[in-house]
Image: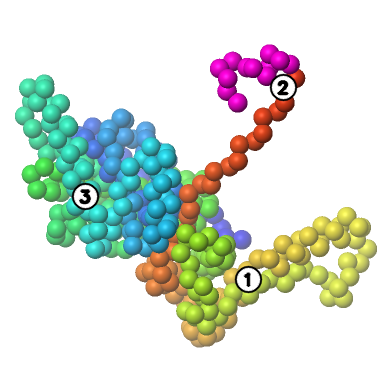
Amino acid sequence: MQPAIQWYPGHIAKAERQLKAQLAKVDLVIEVRDARIPRATSHPRLKRWMEGKHRLLVINRRDMVSEAARLSWDRWLRDQGEVPWWCDAKTGTGVKQLQDAAIRAGDQLNARRAGRGMRPRPVRALVLGFPNVGKSALINRLVRQKAVESARRAGVTRTLRWVRVGQALDLLDAPGVLPPRLEDQRAALLLALCDDIGQAAYDGEGVAVAFLHLLDALASVPEAGLPEQLLEKRYGVALPRRQGRRHADGEHDDASDEDRERDCAGDRALESLPDGLAWLEVAAARHTSGDTARMAQRLLDDFRRAVLGPIALERPPQKTATPPVAAASTPAAATGAGGEA
């Protein structure tokens, strides 16, 4: 079993304290999320930090998911009342549109300032998000030069820094922020897979095995974008299935009928799961001289660099069917108040 994933280094705790002190100076919050995991990179404290400020939602790395996944998420987010700005900070796709949206927010700010007899000024925007979602790369693209340090690993930005974009926009680059405790361990696993959390937080082999199981589950999700026989074509190794737990002689000894039925159900469940560890061992023997840790890192790096193709690890929450309304016991209950069914 994969140990619990937790990561809250000292520089993030310090940056969060500094961030709270700077929030009063900010007019606009630009929240950046990872297109591969839009929900897992949504910070649970963001609404409290915003304090009613205007917000722009940026979904970065749009190049790393399929167009079907992007459209699916776009529809779902708009249904939730969001207006997502899809960007690729690496190539600049969507960045100009985001800049225009931020400047329009500044125009609204200065219109209010003018109404109070105050002089116009650049809009001050905080660029906020989890580690390694591309905040600094986005700022550099907006500034059109390497104004802040940027790399595709978590924890590069460690201090807050203001950067000016033209005469209309000031950006505050902040370190990636995480909750002090990652309660949702499935989301934590997705953060680890996308390298949006420090490598000290998790076991690489365990995360690679979990990734293999996730790939198997996503194979039946068209918008995930998985090519057919991805692992076989890339590494020459298919993902095997687990064998059921049985006694050596195939019998269940003195187990009761109920125990036998439960064991058989467990066997069938095990047989339906992919054996990620077995795949890792076979692939390691083939590619990394039997070193499973190196093979795990190679698999994760291939995904993170999109060598495996654009793969969306999350899909929007599915709508659940509305349960049937129970039959009313009296005419009065049948009509109800307000006619709501």
Q: Can you give x and y, in whole percent of width and height, for residue 329 in the image?
A: 75, 19
Q: Tell me if residue 53 comes above or below residue 88 in the rendering.
A: above
Q: Can you give x and y, in whole percent of width and height, for residue 49 in the image?
A: 33, 35
Judge depth for marks 1 and 3 and give the one in front.
3
Identify the element where label 2 is drawn: loop
Nearest the eye: 104 or 123: 104
Identify the element where label 3 is drawn: helix
Sequence-wise first label, 2 or 1: 1
Which residue appears at 48% of the width and 49% of the height?
316
Q: Which residues are magenta?
A: 330-341
Judge depth for marks 2 and 3 and give the one in front.
2
Three-letter amino acid code at disc 1?
Asp
Around disc 2, counting alpha carbons within 10 Å, would you say few (fewer than 14), some (14 to 19), or many (20 or more)?
few
Q: Marks 1 and 2: in contact by CB < 8 Å? A: no
Sequence-wise first label, 2 or 3: 3
Nearest the eye: 2 or 87: 87
Would you identify the image quadrant in which residue 283 lies?
bottom right
Residue denoted by label 2: 328
Residue denoted by label 3: 97
Residue denoted by label 1: 275
